[in-house]
Image (cartoon, helix red, strand yellow):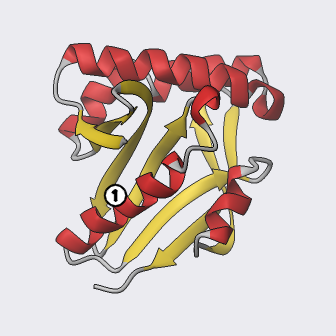
Amino acid sequence: MIDFRIASNTNEYLLIEQLADSIWRQHYIPIIGLDQVDYMLNKFQSVEAITSQIKEGYQYYIIYFEEAPVGYLSILKEGSVLFLSKIYVSFDYRGNNIGKGAITFIESKAKAEGLNTIRLTVNKHNSAGKFYERIGFINKGPIVMDIGGGFVMDDYVMEKKITL
């Protein structure tokens, strides 16, 4: 059973921070290195960063699988598009269709807002890009974003059209 619960307090933001620390260190150190992982965790995945992002309109959800917190996602309405800012699942729980369940949940959120496009960015070397393509996302091309600290995000922009 997969459940998505909106994060709305500091304890839940702390849980997301802890999930991010574990997931990111396992997955991203081989892709972008320890220094950039440390920088990005602090800048984008800390309690302070999450609190700030929520004030800007982001919604964070903790993903539960059989009542265990196994990941998180974040979305933001940007005009006529739902931006999928973050979606991460713990390695120990991959293969349980949690990612597909999360995309279905995100699609329902987009439909509820009258939005027919979901957009995300994914690191060019992240295997998740293939997952997104398999479930209907189209690679719209590269984007390089300076995120400060001497680091850049070297990503692809991906979009999925959904039927309202």
x, y (%) of residue 146? Answer: 62, 43
x, y (%) of residue 47? Answer: 34, 18
Q: Look at mark 1 in the image and give the residue it sits on.
A: 105
Q: Is residue 118 above or below residue 75?
A: below
Where disc 1 sits, the SS reads: helix
Amino acid type, callout 1: Phe
Of residues 82 and 27, the one nearer the viewer is 27
**Residue drawn where x is 36% and y is 17% of the image:** 15
Q: Quadrant of residue 95?
A: top right
Q: Is residue 39 above or below residue 111?
A: above
What is the quadrant of the N terminus in the image? top left
Of residues 1 and 117, the one nearer the viewer is 1
x, y (%) of residue 116? Answer: 34, 80
Of residues 103 and 35, the one nearer the viewer is 103
Report whether 103 appears left or right of 113: right
Q: Quadrant of residue 81?
A: bottom left
Of residues 77 and 64, the one nearer the viewer is 64
Report whether 20 appears left or right of 110: right
What is the quadrant of the C terminus in the image? bottom left
Report whether 21 appears left or right of 36: left
x, y (%) of residue 76? Answer: 31, 54
**Residue drawn where x is 27% and y is 61% of the image:** 77
Q: Looking at the image, which residue sits at the far bottom?
A: 163
**Residue drawn where x is 74% and y is 47% of the image:** 126
How many residues crowd around disc 1 within 10 Å: few (fewer than 14), some, or many (20 or more)?
some
